[in-house]
Amino acid sequence: MVEYNPFTVAQAEVDRAADLLELEPAMRELLRWPLRELQVRLPVHMDDGSVQVFEGFRIQHNDARGPTKGGIRYHPAETIDTVRALAMWMTWKCAVVDIPLGGAKGGVICNPKEMSEAELERLSRAYIGQVGRIIGPDRDIAAPDVYTTPQIMAWMMDEYCRLSGNSDFGAITGKPLGIGGSLGRNDATARGGWYTVREAAQELDIDLGGATIAVQGYGNAGSYTAILGQQLFGCRIIAVSDSSGGIINEAGLNAEAVLQHKARTGSVAGFPAADSIDNGELLALDVDVLWPAALENVITADNAAQIKAKIVAEAANGPTTPEADPILYENDIHVIPDFLCNAGGVTVSYFEMVQNASRDQWSEEYVHQRLDKKMTEAYHTVGDVANHHGVDMRTAAYLVAVQRVAEAVALRGWV
Ligand code: GLU
């Protein structure tokens, strides 16, 4: 099996869009690299009295359209290149939903599952202690991602305000409600994804009521995907998985009950009313909608031919490799690409920033309405480009996003 470097993949994707858009060499060079990269060492006092030095990153890809924005991941397999790729994808994500922000990402190499609350708090404060000098409400705004939570955002926000001396709540989004978080942020990634799937289902004549769903990954995006699929459309969630295993029940799983089981036991595996299934089998299920909702590189040249879903909705960042894409396209599988499908999270983060800046609080209904409008418009803009140029949805999403960023770069006179 090929080992994928997500940054190489991300650069190849930009190169392709740049060719189609006939961008100048200097523009390409600028867009295929991050503008700024900060690599930090974080000494953290552990509960056993030892000090562990963690390695972290904050990478700002492009701020031509506005301050950079993006989450922070805590993951043992994080590298500078995964963070670079994710930062670049944030630039395209903000551009495709047309919010006035650029792209960034942060990461710390650590295993949060093996750390106590107190250790996580000290790590999060240490991270802001270093990265605080390059972020801020008008520079670069951080947010949650894989294995980072609203509580972690609360500590980070507090540490940032301590450094700046101001109530800079808008430096971090995805905060708990009581300290400037937004209603509707928790399930925003999944909800935004469902708005795009709703539009796709209409085009493909799929009735979502009773439609079959499989979800790979049961963190924030995956669990809310399953819950909202049931709540909003009456879908049948037949299989879900996480890093420890998967479960299947053709009659439908109760997504809330699965989440409670995971909260109790640490995994969806072993859920009583289901049989077990591995990740490979889950991806190959004959379902209406398959949601990869975990990490990069799960749909590859090795398994793409086995995918039978009518729609692949990419809630994760980078789940499909470039070699897998043409196979899915030839097999008439409608892929809603990651930086379009999962843009709901950053869109509501943007709403959170707007509320923080204006000291306002929006109702949940208003957040949902505005999110729906953004996602639906973006889906159709990309769909129109795909139809017009006869290309797949990912290529079309790149054409829309890269074009918007290149326009901003040119207007500002950088290239
Ligand atoms: N981490 C999420 C993403 O990859 C959300 C980013 C944000 O809210 O800034 O889109």
Image (cartoon, rainbow, N blue to C red):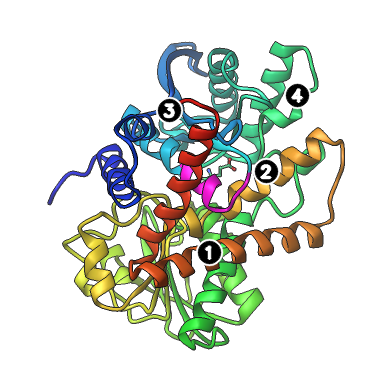
Which residue is disc 1 drawn over?
Answer: 381
Q: Earlier in the sequence, mark 3 or mark 1?
A: 1
Magenta-span inclusion, residue 91? yes
Magenta highlight range: 90-99
Q: Residue at x 41, y 33 (%)?
A: 111
Q: Is residue 147 visible?
A: no
Discs 1/4, front: 1
Q: Earlier in the sequence, mark 2 or mark 4?
A: 4
Q: Secondary structure at mark 1?
A: helix
Question: Is the residue indicated by label 4 positioned so its CB lies within 8 Å of ligand 1?
Answer: no
364 relative to 400 in the view: left or right: right
Discs 4/3, front: 3
Q: x, y percentage for residue 34?
A: 40, 28
Establish if 65 lies above or below 256: above
Q: x, y percentage for residue 402?
A: 43, 46
Q: CA distance from mark 2 to mark 1?
A: 20 Å
Q: Earlier in the sequence, mark 1 or mark 4?
A: 4
Q: Residue at x 48, y 69 (%)?
A: 384
* Picture quadrant of ligand 1: top right
Q: Secondary structure at mark 4?
A: loop
Magenta-span inclusion, residue 80? no
Q: CA distance from mark 2 to mark 4?
A: 15 Å
Q: Residue at x 60, y 17 (%)?
A: 132
Q: Nearer the viewer, residue 42 or 163?
A: 163
Q: Nearer the viewer, residue 326 or 81?
A: 326
Q: Residues within 10 Å of mark 1 (few under 14, many from 20)?
A: some
Which residue is disc 4 drawn over?
Answer: 168
Q: Quadrant of the C terminus?
A: top left
Discs 3/1, front: 3
Instruction: Name the residue type under label 4.
Output: Asp
Disc ID at residue 350: 2
